[in-house]
Image: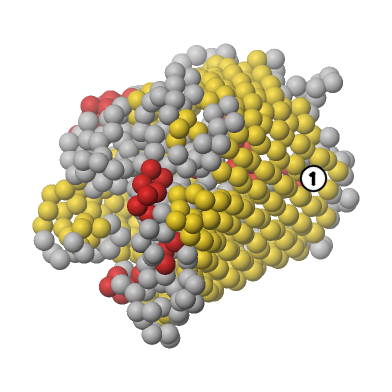
Amino acid sequence: MEKSIFVRALLVFAVTGADSAFAQDLIEFEGDLIGTVTIGDSLRGVATDTATPKTVIDQEELDARQATTTGQLLDTVPNVTLLNGNTPQGGGVSIRGLGSQAGLYSSDGTVSVIVDGVRSGSEEIYRNGSILTLEPELFKEVAVTRGPSGGFRYSSSASAGTIELTTKDASDFLEDGDTFSFRQKLGYETNGASPLSTSILSFAPDEKFEALLFYGIRTSENREDGSGDEIVGTEFEQTSALAKLSYQINGTSRVTFAYQENQIPERDVNYNVYDPDVDNFFGRVDRDTADTTAYLEYAFNPEENALIDLTARLQFKQEEVSLDPVFNPFGTDLLEADHLTETTSLVLENTSLFDTGTVGHEVVAGIEVGERTRTSLTDAGTNAASAPGGTDEYVALFVEDNLAFGERLTLTPAIRYEAQRLTSQNNDDLADGTEFEASSWTGGVGAYYEVTPAFAVFGTVAHNENLPLLDNLTNENVEETEEADTIELGVSYDGLDVFTRDDSFAAKLTIYQTDISNGRTYSAGGGLFESDIELQGIEIEASYVHPKFYLDLAAAANRGEVSELSDGSQVDNYFEGSTADNIELTVGKRFREDQLNVFITVDHTFENNRTESEDGPTAPSDEYTLFDLGVGYTPNSGVLEDTEFRISFENITDEDYRQFGSTRRGQGQNVVLSVAHTF
């Protein structure tokens, strides 16, 4: 694949200050880079002390971004692209070109979505599903790991990455000595005339017990694009609720219960949430979307024994899309199916700290046993032909060891074994009780070496396998396992007093290559699939903090080639999951002892004509630049103490654009206002 000038320039920038010969080698390498960065006092930090390409969006940034959907928080991360993200339903997330199929499915198993440690399902729902129907105000932290590193704890298939979402706790709103607090937030968006209300009640009568109750409601009319045209299908109403209770039994034991629910009711809307303009083809439905996550956890952590830090969790996840046809031009059962995926699992996990000679170990080991049940029942009492159902009984074991060889070298091997049994139920084309079994061994190893206190190099090799989904029960893919092998290389820098006194600069850059074999996810037409796919990419994160201002940079590019189809025929095609090159720069300044924060973000996406398509979501896309301005004021004294005022100006220039992979035009100019007060 051709290496763009943009990619070369980014490589030169990222390795400035490093060895020039090494920089030239990187520029000539036909691959790409990825990284993670964590640094203080900018809007987002850069994690430079690990080989894991992980970006953490903390509470401060979550508040500052004022996102309408959880997905909108994610596409600020390098090589993470949000497809159709104006609404919570029908949105998809692509990481390194994998994860969501533009205009078709919201998930293909290569991206894991984890809510409070509970894995969401990855079953496909044709032109209707979404993996992120979640209210962003529920969360205090969103962590995105690009690539397989760190994902084997949850999945064997997450070659693209892992999204971990952590909900708020009562202790986040209680200061020392407080036993009660109430936080009310009100917001409004001008584009879509969208109001928001969230209420959080926190209670801790003593040091042992704490509880949090959350309720939120958000509504929106149809949005408008940069030309002032209505974006059909972006009207929605979403309610969300969270209850989290925790009790410290004694000095070593704690029990926690959490229940979270998101609901999106819709009436007389287009069946196809990805491309509503074709509703006359697919029809119209009443649709109710609901997402529920619950768990009961027991934690045992004796202070005197570093070998034991044990948690036992009973987990439940339910994802539901209920459909009732209003206009069904083809009389298909697809428009009357009630899609329900329920997963119940038990997870045991332990962390041990110990030394073997001069090597320090942090070993995380666990086992998960569970059952996923999927139904898509129609009025006939059987599953829709395009959405087979049944059960997926599975067991998984994983071990990860973080080995510290002195202060400079760290190795992190990880291994996961997973076995499943799929059983057909209520399918017209497959007898009840028909079983398919599969298993996989996956894993990888990461290495991080600190060359100097400021400069480090790192790398990762990993192997993933995407076991069959229940959605594949009635087709030929049910006995096929897709495999992916990934190599990552990178450098990081983290220093103080770099350009001037009292400043700090951190940056991380990684190149990666992922080879997919025996692919059965991406259709090539005529009943064939793209079997052998090679992906390459680059991701850069950087943060600079000066006493008077701060800068955050995120940039990425990815490429993909298809060399073979499932019938063995050789081709030389673009992989159309690869997204457009992107660079985002945030410049900000804090005033009045950090009470006032003002920042502007410039987000430039380059044109993308690396596609075989002439129309649809993967048709060539033009370049565009978006400008956003954010202002946050949080007084720390006086009558306005404990009050937060925020205003965001999004797409200030009213740019008319379409993101590659999306069927809809992007949202035009928008003003977001909010005020929150903690009593």
Say whether residue 593 is left or right of residue 342. Answer: right
Point out residue 403 in the picture as x, y percentages from the top left corner.
48, 55
Q: Residues within 10 Å of mark 1 (few under 14, many from 20)?
A: some
Query: In the picture shown, does residue 84 fall above or below 20?
Result: below
Q: Name the one closer to the observer, 581 or 68.
A: 68
Point out residue 54 in the picture as x, y percentages from the top left corner.
47, 44
Q: Name the one closer to the observer, 366 or 411.
A: 366
- Secondary structure at badge 1 equals strand
**What's under tag 1, amino acid-wise?**
Leu
Q: Name the one closer to the observer, 354 or 446.
A: 446
Quadrant the N terminus occupies: top left
Which residue appears at 40% of the width and 24% of the height?
Answer: 227
Can you tell which quarter of the image residue 105 is in? bottom left
Say whether residue 321 is left or right of residue 271. Answer: right
Which residue appears at 43% of the width and 42% of the height?
Answer: 84
Point out residue 99 in the picture as x, y percentages from the top left corner.
38, 52
| Residue under label 1 | 201
